[in-house]
Amino acid sequence: MASAKQASRISALNAGMIGCHSCDLVVNAKDDFHHHLQCPRCGANLHSRKLNSVARTWALIIAALVFYVPANVLPITTVVSLGKEQSDTIMSGVIYFMQSGSWAIALVIFVASVFVPLMKILILVFLLVSVQRNIQWRPREQAKLYRLTEIVGKWSMVDVYVVTILVALVNLGVIADIDAGPAALYFAAVVVLTMLAARTFDPRLIWDSKEEVE
């Protein structure tokens, strides 16, 4: 009975099955498990786990944290109207929309440009620490947190889209002109780095530590 239960819990890793990251084909590589393999369908290199997943994810997250500071401190837009120049950061833009009564716009900008990138970074840091420390706290919920970072990642670019549209549309010379500030580049870097970090992290590591304890 115990052996049957244990057999039903056998993982793909222990069974010698490897999933291709390019075409999702599942390959039986048990006979040659520790060697460098190639997918028979698309020719991509096969690995039971993403190579150096934890180290690469840490590197991307640390880089994102470094860029996150200037992305929120430096001006993201510079508005020139009738000879007067005004620079706004992400938070000053949120405060402006709140004071003007546009709470919905302020909420969207705050969630997409401040909360979501920081939330992704914190979730990935938690998952990395959990994997390295073999924390056995609810692996199913950890997997859901990982999927959340993948789903919401692209929505962080909304602020960059808004700045790009404003720069393209508002170009009236002396009357009014909007230019992108240095924070726009840093913010775009944060978004791209967090998206790459989510792709680099291997969520199967969450279950590996759990199976080792069992």
Image (spheres, rainbow, N blue to C red):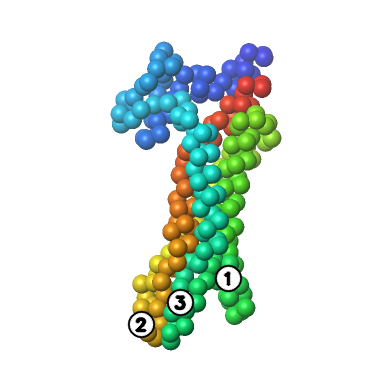
Residue topped by disc 2 = 172
Q: Which mark is residue 92?
A: 1
- Earlier-in-chain disc, 3 versus 1: 3
Quarter of the image with the N terminus in it: top right
Q: Nearer the viewer, residue 21 or 111?
A: 111
- Earlier-in-chain disc, 2 versus 3: 3
**SS at circle 3:** strand
Which residue type carries mark 3?
A: Val
Residue topped by disc 3 = 79
Q: Quadrant of residue 174?
A: bottom left
Which residue type carries mark 2?
A: Leu
Which residue type carries mark 1?
A: Ser
The crowding category of the residue bearing disc 1, from other C-alpha atoms within 10 Å (few below 14, some 14 to 19, many at least 20), is some
Quarter of the image with the C terminus in it: top right
Whether 48 is drawn above or below 168: the answer is: above
Q: Is residue 202 something one can see in this rendering?
A: no
Q: Mark 2 touching mark 1, by CB under 8 A?
A: no
